Amino acid sequence: MEIRHITDNISVFHFTGSSNIYLLHSEENALIDSGHELTFDNLQKALDSFSLSLSQIQYLLTTHSHGDHVGNHSRIKKTNPQIKIIGSIKYKEYQQKRKIKKLLVGAEDQFSPYLLDEEVKDQDEIKIGNLEFRIIDLPGHTPDSIGFFLPGEKILFSGDCLYEGFVSQVDYYQDMEYSAQQLLRTYQKILDLEIIKVLPGHGPEINDIHKKIQKLIKKLNKLTRMPEFLVINNLIPSFEYYIHKNPGYTKDQVIEFFVKNIKMMNDPIFKKIDNHLNETLEKLLSLMSINDMIYLEGEKIFLKNKLNYLIS
């Protein structure tokens, strides 16, 4: 666990295998995202260092509903029934789609369901203590991805739509190429904001925003012209999680799981690479090995670093 102070009233908690959790501490206290469910005890310890407890947190802001970001929402609500959970108006629809399709079960974090106390949409405004936020729709990574923008401070809490140096995973519960186009528009929307600092869902803060987003736009445009590499970029986090959960599985076992799930997706992008799908997934594993994400013991595959190491 690492705690860093960003401004006088914004701090971040970095946990292994989890999203960043941001603490806003002023006249009122809030968390942005709650992290993976396994971080609950460490979250309480982090709050202890500020002489705070969960019962003293008034708001829980949600960037998007993936398990490494909302894993503690339900438990926090039980601990503090008065806390107000805020998230996208698209949350329920997105989770209903995930519940029906059940894609990549075993290769992504699950979480206990929770209810939103307040649904927000693009350009809504909320005030927490002396911090005034504007809600920014940031779809692409998920349909319910939103950013919390502080115009006065020129700071954006971006969730997982933006990482330092590489393109985010795009949503596969809809046409993946459509999700990629959404992410391109999200990058442009961020470019149009007056920002000096982005606080992402994983990893360190991002400065020099315009230059870095222009590079990401070039990378994503290149990926959209090469379906095989858009698939590889998109599935690496899922492969990482699956190998983490199933250490010692063979290459054939891993590829068999993903081929089975890919056929359930019925996404047009996979039809473009159907005649070499297995080879594409083997290439993905090779890239993970080259980037020191996995290692082999005979035929068995293991995760080399801790989960989410690459983006942290």
Image (tube, grey):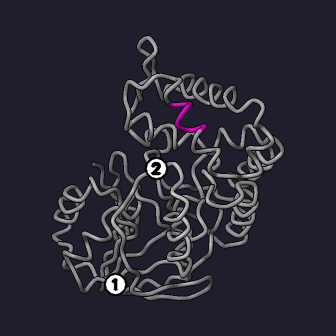
Q: Secondary structure at mark 1?
A: strand
* Mark 1 vs 2: CB contact within 8 A: no
Q: Quadrant of residue 89?
A: bottom right
User: Badge 2: few (under 14), some or many (20 or more) residues near its Cα, within 10 Å?
Assistant: some
Q: Quadrant of residue 197?
A: bottom right
Q: Nearer the viewer, residue 155 or 90?
A: 90
State whether residue 203 appears in this view.
no
Q: Quadrant of residue 295?
A: top left
- In the image, which is nearer the foreground, mark 1 or mark 2? 2
Say if 274 sits above or below 282 in the image.
below
In the rendered image, which quarter contains the C terminus? top left
Q: Nearer the viewer, residue 285 or 304?
A: 285
What residue sits 42% from the left and 19% below the top? 300
Q: Secondary structure at mark 2?
A: loop
Say if 62 sits above or below 71 in the image.
below
Pointer 2 residue = 105
Q: x, y percentage for residue 192?
A: 73, 71
Q: x, y percentage for residue 80?
A: 21, 79
What residue sits 46% from the left and 60% below the top? 66
State whether residue 275 appears in this view.
yes
Query: Which is nearer the N-term, disc 1 or disc 2?
Result: 1
User: Badge 1: few (under 14), some or many (20 or more) residues near its Cα, within 10 Å?
Assistant: some
Horizontal side of 145 relative to 191 (left or right) equals left
Q: Nearer the viewer, residue 215 or 55?
A: 55
Label number found at residue 84: 1
- In whole angstroms, how far apart are the C-alphas of marks 1 and 2? 29 Å
Q: Which residues are magenta?
A: 254-259
Q: Nearer the viewer, residue 299 or 309?
A: 299
The kind of residue tagged 2 is Val
Horizontal side of 134 relative to 186 (left or right) equals left
Q: Residue furthest right?
A: 225
